Image (cartoon, rainbow, N blue to C red):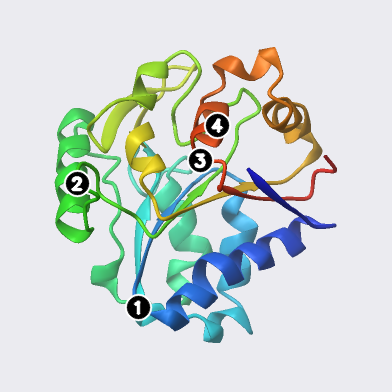
Amino acid sequence: MIPYIYATPEEVARAVAEEAFVRPSQEGWVHIALSGGSTPRLLFSLLAEEPLRSAVRWDRIHLYWVDERCVPPTDPDSNYGMTKATLLDHVPIPEDQVHRIRGEADPEREAKDYCWLVGSELPFDGEYPVFDIVLLGLGDDGHTSSIFPHEPQLLTEEAPYAVATSPKGQRRIALTGPTILAARRLLFLVTGEAKAPVLRAILSSSPEAKGYPAAYIAGHRPDAALYTDVVL
């Protein structure tokens, strides 16, 4: 990974906003896969405010999700629900350019349907659909997307999306390894000292990082950009 280190989470979020939303949308159409969880919340909030809100060409952006919890969009756990409340309700993005994963649907069926949707919207590299930007997070157990260490088969699963299960038993729909790696650009957004040990392990290629899904992705895409406030 190529690190870009900033002093505060807000500076990190502003840099990612410029790289993932502002500049690409000013250049043309852009298809972005968003991660959920708590880390992107600040990014979304800043994008919903001026001056970033007006700097983005929302009419040129298509949004997708890297992963989703299998819950209704009104559930506090819903990645889409969080994104809607912090970003989508506040920016002029066309409704038909927001492609949510239906967490309330049957997981196996929805994973297949979302594979079809992504395949119909994106170009292919010969095997896999190609996002312009995939925005990834990092869990303190080394997971990314909803690919956890106990389900390494999702790192090589050929279907673009598949059903995953968190260590606590929650079912999720997750973007899988090959389609993550096929993206034109990969951006890791990692903030907070709680993420420091796992991030340092990945960057130093320490033995403990061998089973981390995020380490697998980083190892296969050395050009992935890391935006962080962690001192490395």
Instruction: Answer whether labels 3 and 2 touch (C-beta < 8 Å).
Output: no
Instruction: Note whether residue 178 is visible.
Output: yes
* Disc 3 target residue: 221
Eye-nearest disc, 1 or 4:
4
Please report whichever mark, 4 or 2, sits nearer to the chain's N-terminal start.
Answer: 2
How far apart, in angstroms, are the residues tagged by discs 1 and 4?
31 Å
The type of residue carrying mark 2 is: Gly
Instruction: Answer whether labels 3 and 1 touch (C-beta < 8 Å).
Output: no
Please report whichever mark, 3 or 1, sits nearer to the chain's N-terminal start.
Answer: 1
Q: Position of residue 76 (x, y in %)?
A: 48, 43
Query: Which residue does the image show at 50% across and 17% down from the upper left?
Result: 149
| Quadrant that contains the C terminus | top right
Q: Which label belongs to residue 219?
A: 4
Question: Would you call the spot at circle 2 few (<14 residues within 10 Å), some (14-19), or many (20 or more)?
Answer: few
Closer to the camera, 130 or 93? Answer: 130
Please report whichever mark, 1 or 4, sits nearer to the chain's N-terminal start.
Answer: 1
Query: Which residue does the image show at 46% across and 83% down from the upper left?
Result: 26
Please report whichever mark, 1 or 2, sits nearer to the chain's N-terminal start.
Answer: 1
The type of residue carrying mark 4 is: Gly
* Lateral position of residue 82 relative to residue 8, left or right: left
How far apart, in angstroms, are the residues tagged by discs 4 and 2?
22 Å
At mark 4, the secondary structure is helix
* Disc 1 target residue: 60
At mark 2, the secondary structure is loop
Taking 88 as reference, is 136 above or below it? above
Res. 215 image quadrant: top right
* Disc 2 target residue: 126
Query: Which residue does the image show at 34% across and 35% down from the upper left?
Result: 178
Closer to the camera, 219 or 148? Answer: 219
